[in-house]
Image (cartoon, rainbow, N blue to C red):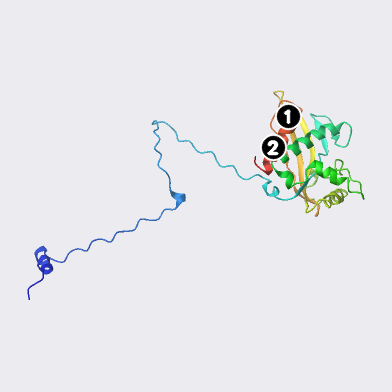
Amino acid sequence: MLPSVTALLLAACGGAPTPAPTPTPAPSVSAETVVPRDTTRRTPDAAPVASAPRPGPPVFGDYASRMVVVFPLQRYAVADSGWMTAASATGRPRAALLDSALTAILRDRGLETTWSLPPNTSRVAQREVMNRTDPRALSTAGLVPSKRRNDVDLREPLGSQLRAIIALVPESRLVLLPLEARVVSTPDGMRQATLRIAFLDGRMSTVLSFPDVIGPPAADEKAAVQAVAVKFADLVIVP
C-alpha cells in the first residue's frame, strides 16, 4: 500500500505539524469604561480642563411631589430694627412682599397644583371657625432653634393652630412655615435678605427641618426679598 501524500509530507518536514493557536476572544468593555480619544490639538504646556461637577438634587426636592401647606410669613425686620409682626399695621405690607414673592416663584415652578400656597392657606383659614386662627399670627414664640436642640415637638398652642387649619386642606400633613425675614445692608450698599423657615409635620406636631435661607445681594429691599424667595425655590425644585 502506497503511503499517503500527507505521510510523505510529514516525513519530508521531519515530524508532525504544530497546531495553529486558538484565537483568544477580546475582553468585553462596558459603555462606562469607553473613553473617547481626544483628537484636539494642544500646545505642549496646555493643562487639561476638568469638567464641571453635575449639580446634585435639590435639598428639599422630596417635598416637591407632596402636599405642603405654606403659611404666610410671621414677622419681618429691616437691619437692626425690631421685629414687625405680619398681623400688625406696620408689618403687614412688608411681610406681604415676601408672601407675594414666594407665591409667584413657587407658582412659576409649577407647585401651585401640589402645594397650598399662602393665598389659598389664608382663604382656608377663614373657614376655621372654632379657634379663628389668624395664619399670619401663629404662636411661634417657642419655635426658636437655639432653644430646641433637645426638643423636637411643637409647643401648644402652635400645634393645635396648625392642625385646625391643615385639617381643611385635603391630604395635607406637611407644613412650610416662614418664620421671619430680615433685610440688611451689605458693605457695598446692596440689600440682602435672610429667610428663616420651618418644615413641620402638622399632624404629629414635630419639626422636620429648620434652615436659614440667605439670598444674594440685590439693588433694593424688594429685589432682595424676591431674590431670597427664588433661592428657597431652588432648594425645592430647579427651574
- Name the residue tied to disc 1: 223
Q: Nearer the viewer, residue 97 or 52?
A: 97
Label 1: how many residues lie within 10 Å, few (<14), some (14-19) or many (20+)?
some
Asked if residue 143 shows in the view, the reply is no
Residue 55, position as x, y percentages in the image: 59, 42
- Splitting the image into 4 quarters, where does residue 143 fall? top right
Residue at 85%, 49% (x, y): give it. 165
* Residue farthest toward the top in the current orientation of the protein: 189
Asked if residue 105 shows in the view, the reply is yes
Disc 2, SS: helix
Q: CA distance from mark 2 to mark 1?
A: 12 Å
Counting residues from the start of the chain, the first of labels 2 and 1 encountered is 1
Residue at 67%, 47% (x, y): give it. 61
Disc 1, SS: helix
Q: Quadrant of the N terminus?
A: bottom left
Q: Name above or below for residue 66 compared with residue 40.
A: below
The count of marks equals 2
* Residue farthest toward the bottom in the current orientation of the protein: 1
Q: Are marks 2 and 1 in contact (CB under 8 Å)?
A: no
Q: Quadrant of the C terminus?
A: top right
Residue 68, position as x, y percentages in the image: 76, 48
- Splitting the image into 4 quarters, where does residue 145 fall? top right
In the image, is 51 to the left or to the right of 234? Answer: left
- Name the residue tied to disc 2: 231
Q: Name above or below for residue 61 compared with residue 220.
A: below
